[in-house]
Image: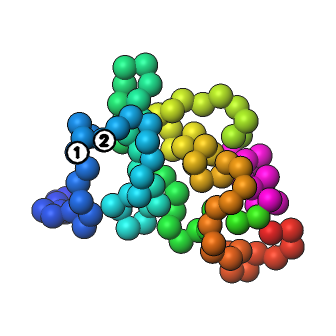
């Protein structure tokens, strides 16, 4: 027997009212951002970025993330990886959160 959730714990998004390729805050408590990704006639709602992790908090962390996730390679706009690279980990600036606990060294 499967457990069925009658009321989701977050607000349901209306895809028709969202603009294409414009990130905004996610209503999901465990995700930072949501975007209605549009590419080649397809539309998809994508939630990305975990709330408990800082993003873009140092140049070394940015370099490591971008290398680990292949941010320089061409990806579809319909993937969370594309949006994390483009929005959360692109350029300077970013989270005011400090380094994750237990991470030492170059970060």
Residue numbers of the magenta segment: 59-69
Q: Position of residue 95 (x, y in %)?
A: 62, 66
Q: Nearer the viewer, residue 74 or 56?
A: 56
**Residue 69, numbered label:** none
Q: Nearer the viewer, residue 93 or 62?
A: 93
Q: Position of residue 75 (x, y in %)?
A: 60, 31
Tell me the quarter of the image containing the C terminus.
Answer: bottom right
Dot 2 falls on a residue whose secondary structure is: loop
Instruction: Judge whether 70 appears above or below 84 on screen.
Output: above
Instruction: Judge whether 102 appears above or below 89 on screen.
Output: below
Q: Residues within 10 Å of mark 1 (few under 14, many from 20)?
A: few
In the rendered view, does 17 fall on the left or right side of 64?
left
Q: Position of residue 53 (x, y in %)?
A: 59, 68
Which residue sits at x=41%, y=58%? 25
Q: Is residue 36 visible?
A: yes
Q: Residue furthest right?
A: 105
The residue beneath circle 2 is 18
The residues bearing labels 1 and 2 have C-alpha atoms spaced at a distance of: 7 Å
Q: Residues within 10 Å of mark 2 (few under 14, many from 20)?
A: some
Residue 10 among magenta residues: no
The residue beneath circle 1 is 14
């Amino acid at each position: 027997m499967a457990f069925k959730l009658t009321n989701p714990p977050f607000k349901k998004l209306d895809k028709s009212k969202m603009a294409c390729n414009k990130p905004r805050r996610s209503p999901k408590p465990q995700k930072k951002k949501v975007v209605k990704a549009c590419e080649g006639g397809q539309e998809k709602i994508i939630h990305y970025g975990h709330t408990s992790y800082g993003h873009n908090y140092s140049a070394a962390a940015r370099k490591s993330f971008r290398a680990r996730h292949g941010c320089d390679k061409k990806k579809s706009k319909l993937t969370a990886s594309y949006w994390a690279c483009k929005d959360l980990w692109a350029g300077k600036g970013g989270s005011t959160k400090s380094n994750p606990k237990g991470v030492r060294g170059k970060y």
